[in-house]
Amino acid sequence: MLAQIEGSQAVAEAVVLCRPDVIAAYPISPQTHIVERLSRMVKQGDVGRCQYLNVESEFAALSVLIGASAAGARTYTATTSQGLLFMAEAVYNAAGLGLPIVMTITNRAIGAPINIWNDHSDSMALRDAGWIQLYAETNQEAADLHIQAFRLAEELSCPVMVCMDGYILTHAYEAVDVPTQSLVDTFLPPFSPVQVLDPNEPISIGAMVGPEAFTEVKYLAHQQYLRALTLIPEVAGAFEQQFQRHSGGLCSPYRMEDADAAVIALGSVIGTIKDAVDELRGEGIAAGCVKIGCYRPFPMLQLRAALEGVARVIVVEKDLAVGMGGIVSADVQRALQGLPIPVHTVIAGLGGRSIPKSSLKQMVHDARAERLNEPHFLDLNRTVIDNELARRREQRRAGPVAEHVIRAINAIGTKVV
Amino acid sequence: MSTSRIKFYQTGTYTAGNRLLDEAARTVQSRMDRTNSLNSGHRACQGCGEALGARYAVDAAMRASHNRLIAINATGCLEVFSSPYPESAWQIPWMHSLFGNAPAVASGVAAALRAKGRDDVKVIAQGGDGATVDIGFGCLSGLFERNDDVLYLCYDNEAYMNTGIQRSGATPPFAQTNTTQAVGEAPGNPTGTGKNVPRIAMAHGIPYVATASVADLHDLEAKVTNAMGLQGARYIHIHVPCPLGWGSDPAHTIKVARMAVESGLFPLFEAQFGMVVDRTLIRHKVPVERYLELQDRFKHLFGPQGSPDAIAAIQSIADANIATYGLIA
Amino acid sequence: MYAVRIHGRGGQGVVTAAELLALAAFTDGKHAQAFPSFGSERMGAPVMAFCRIDDQVIRTRESVTHPDVVIVQDPTLLHHVDIFGGLSPSGYVLLNSTFSLDELGLEEFLRRLPGDHVCALPASDIGQKHLTRPIANTALLGGFAAITGWITLASVESAIRHKFPGALGEANAAAAREAYDQVTACLNEPGRVTHHARAN
């Protein structure tokens, strides 16, 4: 049923429709509304025998789910940023143990400096831990991806992160169609584990594997993981058939038919990019964009196929490999290896900075005129930078960078940025 | 909850002997139908106190749960020596996740069982002192505070042994470890440090807390059995000498453990909801030297370079325990 | 597409106001996107919330830097935050205040806007009357419906009742209605450049 609701609420309702058995919750902005709503629904008795545990840290949250999943329960939690890092050890553990846990990442920047607003540094930090990573463009897609995620995870015995932009999506209030229970039940069968802790058939899980076998175990995991590239389109296709709308998939092109400049991005910024593409097209520029819906495993072949004909690619990413530049752009470059297509890296939206449509349009113009730096930081305040660099040149004990920059920009909340 | 003391003449030794006892009073280990949950063939050192304690504790838990038990293990000696891929010494459903999360993982298993309506299956979590007192402490407290239905067993050999004998929050004062070496002005582990986790467990007000030792295996089994008859968060802290780490004779593991109990350094007691309800009286009190002299990790306290003051300080700890728990009749 | 920016302080229901606005637009069959711009929970800190309304699907996610409407729930923000930054030259301003725009020192500045696009409204007083607390947000929504005509009063009331059940919903709806009536009456007065709705 179509309802005007908050993104967090849409996700909570989607999760409940998937009939979870165990939910672990540790609060962190901007995920709090999801776990609060789930708490209410479980307590009211709307989620069957589902157990909701308020735990003492994010590390505990995922650890609880590791135990629960190994004991045959369908499991869920949500976290972000600092919380995701705090559970990092468990993130690798869950993947290594092949447990089909589903976790929402409400993408948020990682400190220091502490910042509670959106960017992708958190999920990027753990992109190689062995979890499938899906990114939502809208709250509708965020809700839908959770339903697809449980099915994917359980078919592959691999955990899945559903990434949605913190505040921008989680706290956005927009129309979402929340499906019926019967529709979800048809799409998502009960959890049938590949391995389970069961007194009737005792097994040992989590053995130490030495040099003689570790490589083979990892190779098998690698191969299994790559199966997601086939399974994700299948699951998205089945979803579309049953739910009558397109959600998910590996990558989605927009106005790419005869595009000569392609903009690539993950998550909600794709919406703004589509508006920019339409305006550029109106101005005679053959722009298009490709949304990467599944970032891990990386859809090499599909992206290459989508981009083959273009003259240039601009990757807009909300993350930064300090000292290196782009993270997503590096993967895109690898996908385009051998093709004479320049790939521009544009770092945008760090720490929740708004990405204006006008800046994106200018970026395309600049790319076409070879005016972009590599990497290019969108809307960088050059004056503040230059003043700070000058200040530091003058004295050894220059003090903390962040505080000086904030002072230079003149307090938070007084301007719309 | 108190058990009647088995007299020496009835059993031959009061560790495991059962011959002259009534069937019902015999240990689980003495029975033909014991589950051998931790089966032979594991890679523990000769004389390992932890392997001994785990065998008794887990088989007792299995018996109490009618063989419907799931065990979660932290990283450490027990986990490493019992599960060298592709083999496992465990004959029960068993999982190892990480070093610091065994309590949380066990909470998750218990939640899953509740969600599935399987209240016949019980959950234990086990870890060494490192996993319990230090790195897993936050998760342990969380399990206690939520009163999750898990029995947590801590095998305390007073240091990080599996990584090569380093100091933990359970390492006693003056003990030599590789990160508190017996050199310099204050050799060994500093005084005024460490935590008393049984008392911290009691402070959470959980249904059952007990200390136990491989010096009295009947008592260990009885305490596990008591705990398994209760619901909610339960904790048993088991003293297990480590011949390698303590520098003691592998043949003396039980003797060393007994000296710890009989000196008062390791008091045996039971508590419910934060109050001590029972303790084991010391049969023959011994001075702490009888305990310390069996272990190389305390040898720097003796001899010409020794420290009588340190030994006196350790004796005061023992005396304080005797007073606190009323260990001498 | 129209963009609304609401200014207030934490605890004044600024975010709720944006949500109700979106819900009212949705009820009227439009697309709407409401979102906040705030930090950690803290009463009294300046907050902003935004709402976009369109007949088509709204895809963009950028901040609202060029609003068509600025609603000010707390006038103490006036000389503290850049409240009118980016406002469209044909934009609307709805200000919660018992003072007139002249008394607030804004008449000159707001004269640039169309005469019937600006209104100062004693929304807190209206809230006090119906809700026994100086809550301004639902009254301001009624005022918004009157001054822009982009959403109906009926959908404002429907959104309010959806969010606040029972008597509380009715009281909030009444506040919205009173504000709507006041602003409508005010805008109908001929010959005034800027308007001030007076409490009855």
Image (cartoon, rainbow, N blue to C red):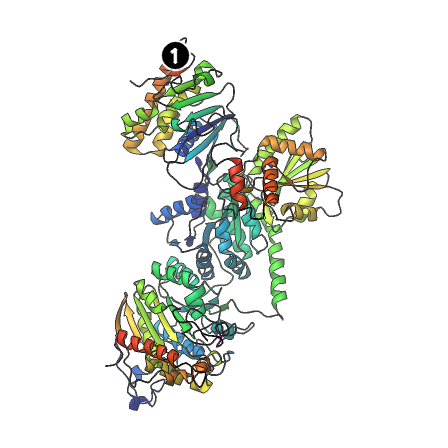
Q: Quick check: A317 left or right of A369? A: left
Residue at the disc numbered 1:
C188
- Asked which secondary structure carries label 1, the reply is helix
Task: Name the residue furthest top.
Answer: C191
Give the residues in magenta.
Answer: B176-192
Q: Which residue type does callout 1 highlight?
A: Asn
Compared to A58, does C110 lie above or below?
A: above
Task: Name the residue furthest left.
Answer: B329
Q: Residues within 10 Å of mark 1 (few under 14, many from 20)?
A: few
B184 is within the stretch colored magenta: yes
Q: Which quadrant: the C terminus of chain B?
A: bottom left
A329 is within the stretch colored magenta: no
Q: Position of residue A184 (x, y in %)?
A: 47, 46
Q: Main secondary structure of the magenta part?
A: loop
Compared to B300, does C4 lie above or below?
A: above
Pick the residue in front: C60 or A358: A358
Q: Quick check: C5 left or right of A356? A: left
Please give the chain letter of the residue carrying mark 1. C
